[in-house]
Structure formats: structure tokens, C-alpha cells
Amino acid sequence: MEPTKILFYALTAITLLSASFVVTARNPIHSVLALILTFFCLSGHYILLNAQFLAAVNIIVYAGAIMVLFLFVIMFLNLKTDDEESKTTVTKLAAVVVGGVLLVVMVAVFRVATMATYNPSSYTSKVGLVENLGMVLFKDYLLPFELASILLLVAMIGSVMLGKREAGDRHY
Amino acid sequence: MNTTELIIKGILIVVLFGVTLLIAMYSTWAERKVAGFIQDRFGPNRAGPGGIFQPLADAGKMFFKEDFIPSQANKWLFILGPCLAILTALMSSAVIPFGESIRYEELLIPVQGIEINIGILYVFGVVSLGVYGLMVGGWASNNKFSLLGAIRAASQNISYEIGFGLSIIAILMMTGSLSIRAIVESQHGFAWNLFNQPLGFIIFLTCAFAECNRTPFDLPECETELVGGYHTEYSSMKLGFYLFAEYINMFVSSAIISSLYFGGYNYPGMDWVRETLTGSLGAATGHNLATLIGTIVLFGKIFFFIFFFMWVRWTLPRFRYDQLMNLGWKTFIPLSILNVVVTGFGLLFDIKYASWAIIIVMVIMVMVSSARAPKPVVQPQRT
């Protein structure tokens, strides 16, 4: 087997194992750490596809910022003992329904999806590098890109408004 | 890549790795010497001439101390914490260009672990992972002071990462590349980024202090409030790894500051040196010697910044926690966004030194506000 193939299969195995550990772990901290490992393996897949920028951004944004905040909240809440009160029959039922609907959607998507093909003679391996990515984002997909940035800006302002202490609020 | 190139590259990587560890090791000695000098005392002077074997003695002591794991601690995470800290600290020096290139027959091999075109983003990724070592270790200790230290470390690192990233964007705009080697090459000779980006440099330097948890930003291990911070429960070599990681981080951030703002291996008159050496010693030897001089210049800059880190540590007191957060969020982030905007205007109208305008305006504002502030009335002493 070629080295890339071995790498791919090893990465895939670790990704699947850690992803299933996220769901099955009893301790929420272990679950979060396994999720971080999953993000790492996904970045490894991006690097195998020669999308270095995407890999770095995935690590910086997800593993470096969002998961730190997850860990932060879980450490503060100290969820060591299982909170049995929140696991009533209704919530369990709702969770099963939501998961089932998601599964149906995924299966439906994968049934109609077609694998994109590429032409080996005209394909350049540099398509995932920053320069090319920037050209595509700022030329072909300028409007969606700017709309996404406006969405992020709105979300940011919303979170600042939520976090802001108003006059007369209790000072914790 | 043929075998010769691979062998040279391998030797180079091992040497760079060893040099990183050696410098971090002797930083611990240098720190105590500098502290001694600043506080007018000797510092370590027992082990060897001038205390030169002190790091070895410390390492021996660390290894032979009892390796204690608290009974209620989460054992695996307790071990994982220091491992993560030292791993992430050692990873980031891979993309720093320590010199131009080594010439072997017709091969030109860059003096760098690996050249990737997202070099600076790689450094950011690794730096943002560094906080896991502290958080996991602090939480696994099962001690509220450790946990508070870990949470302080995490919030400080996340806050200052934003200023860290934004202050570099101006440089990326001027260079047009994310590769550290391309950034260094664009500062050929004496065209250092410091002269175009003084504000970015100040913000970057301060954020580097905060990211390394060095005084005046060492709130995660503030003894007066937290006993020992996130490593209260640690002993033996696990504690040693945490402390060692800090010194490696210091070395790496000094190297990055020198590469981004102080020209890396560039120095005035480097072309002349290269031509003279290749003219008199032949193409290969002269080229390698010129590269070596560049590397020595870079290490000179790195040593200056390591000294600067120590100088600040033994001069300034530590911030209060709210002051730290205010400085990060309300001062550095707006200032670095302003810097990006002004640099953009400068690029648009071809003014290279546009960033100085912010510094001049700031200095004038400070002078005006200090002149307009009411003078403190001198109270006559009662007799």
C-alpha cells in the first residue's frame, strides 16, 4: 500500500473511534477531549487533501477556541455526577425522534448525492492553498462570503448585548 | 527529494531541536543570573564556574523527587497535562526559518524544519493548543486553586490570542504571504518590519508576554491569590515539564518576534558579506559561511528578546486581573483593528510609514491629556 493510503486508513480509524468515544464517554471532560482529537484527525484529512489553510483554520477555530470554551463551561459546572432529573421519558423520546429525523435527512442526502469527478490532466494539486482559496472566495463567491461575514457580525453583536451588564443589574 | 537532501534535512531538524532544548535549559540559569544582577546579588554560583552546571543539577533534583499523584485526581489526565504542555511548546519551532540555505554541491537546503505556505497560521494553531496542557492539568488535580489557575490561564490566552492575530494581519497585508520565510525574505537587508509597523510590534510583543504567562501577565500562577496556580499539585518532573514549557515558549516567541519584526537572519550589509565570502572562499563554503553569519545574527536577536522577557519580569509588578482583561479587550483589539485599517489606507495610497500616524496621534493625545489634568496640590506638611 502507498504511504498516503496507510495514513488515510489510520486517520479514519482514529477519527471514528474518537468520535464514538465522544458519544459513549461517561465523563463530559473525556467526551470533550475526544472531540478535540476528532477535530485533529479531520485536520489530518484536510492535509491529506492538500488543503493546508482549511486544516490550520479548523485547528485554530474549533480545537483552539470553541473547544476551550466548552471545556471551560464543563469545568465550571462540574458535571461529574449524572444529572438524572433532566433525563425524563419525554426528553429521551424527543432525543430519539430528533436523531431519527437527522438520520433520515442524511440518508436522503447521500442517496441523491453524486461523487464529484475531476480531470487528472487539468487538475492542479495547489487548489487548496491559500492563494487559490482567496481568489475563489473573493471573485466567484463574493456575495455568499460577505453575507456570511454579516451573519457572524450580527451574532457577535448579539452575544455582546447578552453579556453586557445594564445599569441596575445585580453585580455578581 | 533524494537521499543526501533527506540526510542533511534530518541532521538539521535534530540540531534545531537540540538547540531549542539547550537554549530553554540555559534560559533557566540565565533567568536566575539576570534576577541576581537586577536585585544586586549573585544568583546561582555553586555548581561549576559561575553556576554553569546549575540546570543539570536542577534536572537531577527534579528527576529524583517523589512523583506524587493526589488520590482523588484523575490519573491519566493528570499525566496528560504536562505532556501536552511540553508537546505544544516544542512543536512551534518547526516552521521558523533559522537561516537562508545550506549549499551542498548543487543542492540548496533551507535552514528550517519545514517550509509550509501557512507558516504563521501553524504557529497560531499550536499556540492556541498550548492552553489545553494548563487546563487539563489544572482540572485533573482536583483542587480548586489549580482549577482557578487553569481557568485564568484559559481566559487570558483566549483573550490575548485575538490581539495577537489581529496585530499580525497588517504585516501579512504588506508581505502578501502567510509563510514565515517569505515574510523574512521581504525584510532583506535593513528593511525590517519594525520601521513600518511599530504599533503592531508593541501589541505583538505584549500579547506574546501574555501568551507565555510571563510577568506582568502571570496571573495563572499568582502565588498571593492561588497558592501555586494550575501546577499547585504537581511535583517532580511533571512540574519540571510545566516550567520547562514556559522557557521553550519564551524561546519560540522570541524567535517569532525577531523573524516577523526584526528581519530574522537579515542584517545590514548582508549582500556585501555574501559576495565577498563567495568570491574569496568559493561558491559552497562562502555561501554556507554567509548563512552561518545570518543564523548567528538571528540568535543574537533571539537572545536579546529572551533577556528582554527576563528584564521585564524582574522590573514590573503583576497586573490585576480586571486590568489584564481591560487591556486585552478594550485597548489592544481596537488598536490593532485601527492599525489594520490605517495600513490598508497606506497600501492603497502607497505610503509605507502610515502606521506611524497612529503612534504620533497617541503620543499627542497622551501629552494633551496629561497637560490638561489638574495638577496635584502640594499639601504643606504640618509642623
Image (tube, rainbow, N blue to C red):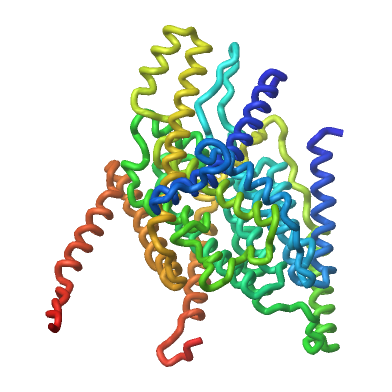
Q: Residue furthest right?
A: A1
* Percent of width and height locating residue B361: 23, 57
Q: Is residue A131 visible?
A: no
Query: Which residue is at 66% across, 69% downward?
Result: A70
Residue A99 against residue A167 in the figure, above or below: above
Question: Disc count in the image?
Answer: 0
Nearest to the observer: residue B262 or residue B337: B262
* Percent of width and height locating residue B102: 55, 21
Where, quadrant-wise, is the N terminus of chain B in this rendering?
Answer: top right
Query: Which residue is at 51% across, 80% downward?
Result: A162
Horizontal side of B109 relative to B4 (left or right) equals left
* Percent of width and height locating residue A159: 52, 75
Asked which quadrant contains residue B22, the reply is top right
* Percent of width and height locating residue A65: 59, 62
Q: Is residue B52 visible?
A: yes
Query: Which residue is at 40% across, 14% downward?
Result: B275
Residue B187 against residue B84 in the figure, above or below: above
Where, quadrant-wise, is the C terminus of chain B in this rendering?
Answer: bottom left
Residue A114 against residue B259 in the figure, above or below: below
Residue B223 against residue B90 in the figure, above or below: below
Horizontal side of B226 relative to B341 (left or right) equals right
